[in-house]
Image (cartoon, rainbow, N blue to C red):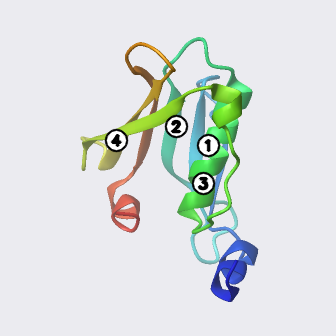
Amino acid sequence: MERQDFNVEGALPVFGFQRSPVNERAFLILKKQGDVKDPIPVGDYTILDKSEDVALAEKKVTNLVSLLNGRKRLIELGQETQSRTLYHIVNEKDEDDKTRILFYELKQQGVSTENALFRLDAEEAKNYE
């Protein structure tokens, strides 16, 4: 780990998440804005695979939020999922001005299946291309 990596890992996070108050299989992606006390929602993550455990999805969201915060150390999930995660950017901007990213799960056999939909404000998504 290099010095700049340590500084990024130790910095206070700008992004966070919480469970959605309206959908038990979704999470809100939050961002702290300046001096505003409460973070504002800038995106969401919805589990599409009905068989996926919400606790596992929460670990995936934790990794996404870590990436948004510029962190490189992520939770290893390969042993837990026994699959690979693929993604496809569906569109750069939808009707809600959000970038939509569809995640797929590829097991050891068969075809990939839709796993989750991640939506993030288009302006925020530009910062991570």
Q: Which residue is mark 2?
A: 45
Mark 2 lies on a secondary structure that is strand
Q: How many marks?
A: 4
Q: Amino acid at mark 2?
A: Tyr
Mark sitting earlier along the chain (2/3): 2
Residue at the limit of the structure toward the front, as seen here:
108
Of label 4 and label 1, which has the lower sequence position? 1
Mark 4 secondary-structure assignment: strand
Q: Are marks 1 and 2 in contact (CB under 8 Å)?
A: yes
Q: Are marks 1 and 3 in contact (CB under 8 Å)?
A: yes
* Residue that mark 1 sits on: 61
Spatial separation of the CA atoms under disc 2 and disc 4: 10 Å
Q: Earlier in the sequence, mark 2 or mark 4?
A: 2
Q: Residue at x 57, y 70 (%)?
A: 33
Q: Dot 3, crowdedness within 10 Å: few (<14), some or many (≥20)?
A: many
Q: Say which residue label 3 marks.
A: 65
The answer to which of marks 1 and 2 sits earlier in the sequence is: 2
Task: Write the residue at 63% across / 58% down.
Answer: 66
Q: Is residue 120 above or below residue 123?
A: above
